[in-house]
Every structure is written in structure tokens, then in C-alpha cells.
Image: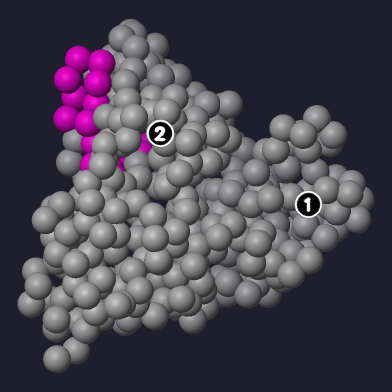
């Protein structure tokens, strides 16, 4: 019996064999996974975890893939995708409970429609709620962790835990949920978020303003992963935000293979068509080296690299210096 047949028999959700990972990330880069499963319930997730643990099969957990660079070789194991099939949510007063696969821009619209404020910064961030929490993502100097009241997660061993905000280890683009890759760590099932009551029209306008700003500043027509480099406070004090630093280094429009530093915003690397992970990593490496030669600092990356064996690390750590 094949791996796909075993997974289908276990009833762990929709199962796809040899699935191209480029179809599951916003950069449109990545080779095939041995199998990809999309569960729709906690029970299906638990069955999948028990199976891969017993069979000693590597497991890689993803959301909507908006902050991931997959290996050109894909992934030798099972990819667990928490996306549309795992995206229930409910609003009660000023609190919102949402599963990890909820689409962040859609969540921002629902929050605004309920007359709640505090999530406007996320209106244009492409990705799933689980990924937003993992990265403590945000914009306009805000972060997702500010809204978290608790996070529900499942360990690779099947243990359920509810994390209070102070247990999540939130800091700039960091959380405790980033560690582990295919071998350890916690899988976010969902979260409860808290907001402040406000005027619907005011909140909706703020969301529309955030979206308009993104459309004017960012290269949204070509596949990309969002901001590539982190906005480190010490580096910012030295030379400004990463987009400016890369632009000042004369790298707008720089290319490696099919990957290009966007001429519109230098903290974005776009896929011109057919870019490989090697192209993207090569361009990240070129940018980091050029900036180091000018300023004596290494830029770190927000985007994370998932290797063939499922190790997930910042893309900057996968680049040769």
C-alpha cells in the first residue's frame, strides 16, 4: 500500500500525492512533497500525527505559504496544510475565535464589520492566522501578538495545550512556535483574539487605507513572499528600514536567475517566472553580502526556508556568507 493510500484509508482529510509545493506558497517556488494532507478537524490532525509518529515519517506543517521558501527538491515526507478546510471562526462581543487556517485579510474584514478595532494593520497581509501568529507578523508597527488572548496548539506527540500570551514568547517577528521544523514544536490549531469596540465606518476606512498603501508601495502583481528582510531596530537606527538599505546599496532590479529585487520596493524579491529556490537564496545572499560590505551588518530574513528534510530556518541562515 502506498503512502497516499494509507493516508486516505486513515481519513485525515484531502490527500494529494507528489504535490508541487510551488502551488502552496505565494512565491510559486518549490518541488514536490511525497504527500500533502489538508485536514478539516482536530481529530483528523491527531490521526495524522499518530500515523507519521508511528511510521517515523517527517511532517512539515504549513498554512497559506506566504512566508515560506520551499526547497527545489520539495519535501520527503507528509505536508500538513492548515488552510481553507480548517478555517472556522466566530465573533462574540469583542473576542474572535478562529482556526489557524483563516485567511488574514478576510478576518480583518470580519473584525472591521463587527465594529472592532485593533486589526486594521493586518488588512493586507496575505496568509493564514496560524502563520501570522507563528511569525508574530504585522505592519504599521503593530504585531499579531498584541491581539492574542490565548493560542490552542497540539504537540507532535498529540498533547493539547492552551498558551497564555506570556507563554507565546512574542517579540519582533518571533514566537515560541517557530522552532522545530519537521521534527519538534507545536502545531497551532487556533486562537482567541481580543479587540476594542469602535465605529464600523472608521475601522473600515482604516482597513481600506492600509490596503491602498500596500497597493501603492508593494509589487503585488508578481509572486513574492512579502517583506524579505527584518526591520531590526539597531540596523534601522544605523541606516534606516531594510528597503532603503537595499536600495541605497544600488540593488533595486538586481537579478539572480528568475528572482529579482523589486524596482518598486527593495525589500521585496519577486519571481519573474520560473525562479528556483536556489535563485532566491542566491539573490538574498548577494544582497546580504553587499549590505555587509557597505555597513558592516548582516540583514536577517523574515522569510523562512523549508529544506528537503523539513528543517525550517530563516532563509538568511540557509545562505552562504
Residue at 80% of width from left, 43% of height from top? 245
State the residue in front, 291 or 225.
291
Residue 197 percent coordinates (x, y): 31, 9
- How far apart, in angstroms, are the residues tagged by discs 1 and 2? 29 Å
- Residue 38 position, x and y percent, is 22, 63
Q: Which residue is mark 1?
A: 298
Residue at point 32%, 35% (across, down): 163
Give the extent of the magenta segment: 90-107
Residue 211 in view here: no
Foreground residue among 210 and 165? 165
Whole-percent x and y of residue 202? 39, 11
Between 274 and 64, the one lying in front of the other is 64
Q: Which residue is mark 2?
A: 167
Q: Is residue 194 above or below residue 28?
A: above
- Whole-percent x and y of residue 215? 54, 38
- Identify the image quadrant of the N terminus: bottom left
Q: Helix, strand or loop at disc 1?
A: loop
Image-quadrant location for residue 104: top left
Amino acid at each position: 500500500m502506498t503512502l497516499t493510500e494509507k493516508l486516505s484509508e486513515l481519513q485525515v482529510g484531502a490527500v494529494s500525492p507528489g504535490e508541487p509545493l510551488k502551488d502552496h506558497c505565494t512565491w510559486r517556488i518549490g518541488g514536490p512533497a511525497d504527500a500533502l494532507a489538508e485536514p478539516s478537524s482536530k481529530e483528523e490532525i491527531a490521526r495524522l500525527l499518530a500515523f507519521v509518529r508511528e511510521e517515523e515519517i517527517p511532517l512539515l506543517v504549513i498554512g497559506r505559504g506566504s512566508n515560506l521558501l520551499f526547497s527545489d527538491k520539495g519535501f520527503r515526507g507528509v505536508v500538513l496544510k492548515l488552510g481553507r478546510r480548517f478555517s472556522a471562526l466566530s465573533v462574540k462581543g469583542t473576542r474572535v475565535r478562529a482556526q489557524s487556517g483563516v485567511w488574514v485579510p478576510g478576518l480583518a474584514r470580519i473584525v472591521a464589520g463587527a465594529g472592532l478595532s485593533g486589526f486594521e494593520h493586518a488588512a493586507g497581509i496575505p496568509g493564514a492566522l496560524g502563520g501570522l501568529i507563528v511569525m508574530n507578523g504585522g505592519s504599521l508597527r503593530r504585531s499579531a501578538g498584541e491581539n492574542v488572548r490565548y493560542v490552542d496548539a497540539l504537540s507532535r506527540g498529540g498533547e493539547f495545550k492552551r498558551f497564555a500570551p506570556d507563554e507565546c514568547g512574542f517579540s519582533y517577528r518571533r514566537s515560541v512556535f517557530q522552532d522545530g521544523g519537521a521534527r519538534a514544536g507545536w502545531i497551532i490549531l487556533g486562537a482567541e483574539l481580543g479587540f476594542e469596540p469602535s465605529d464600523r465606518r472608521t475601522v473600515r476606512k482604516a482597513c481600506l487605507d492600509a490596503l491602498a498603501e500596500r497597493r501603492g508601495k508593494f509589487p503585488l502583481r508578481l509572486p513574492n513572499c512579502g517583506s524579505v528582510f527584518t526591520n531590526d531596530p539597531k540596523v534601522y537606527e544605523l541606516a534606516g528600514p531594510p528597503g532603503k538599505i537595499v536600495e541605497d546599496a544600488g540593488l533595486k532590479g538586481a537579478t539572480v536567475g528568475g528572482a529579482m529585487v523589486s524596482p518598486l520596493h527593495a525589500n521585496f524579491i519577486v519571481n519573474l517566472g520560473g525562479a528556483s529556490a536556489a535563485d532566491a537564496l542566491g539573490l538574498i545572499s548577494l544582497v546580504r553580502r553587499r549590505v555587509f560590505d557597505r555597513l558592516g551588518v548582516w540583514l536577517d530574513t523574515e522569510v523562512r526556508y523549508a529544506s528537503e528534510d523539513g528543517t525550517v530556518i530563516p532563509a538568511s541562515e540557509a545562505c552562504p556568507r
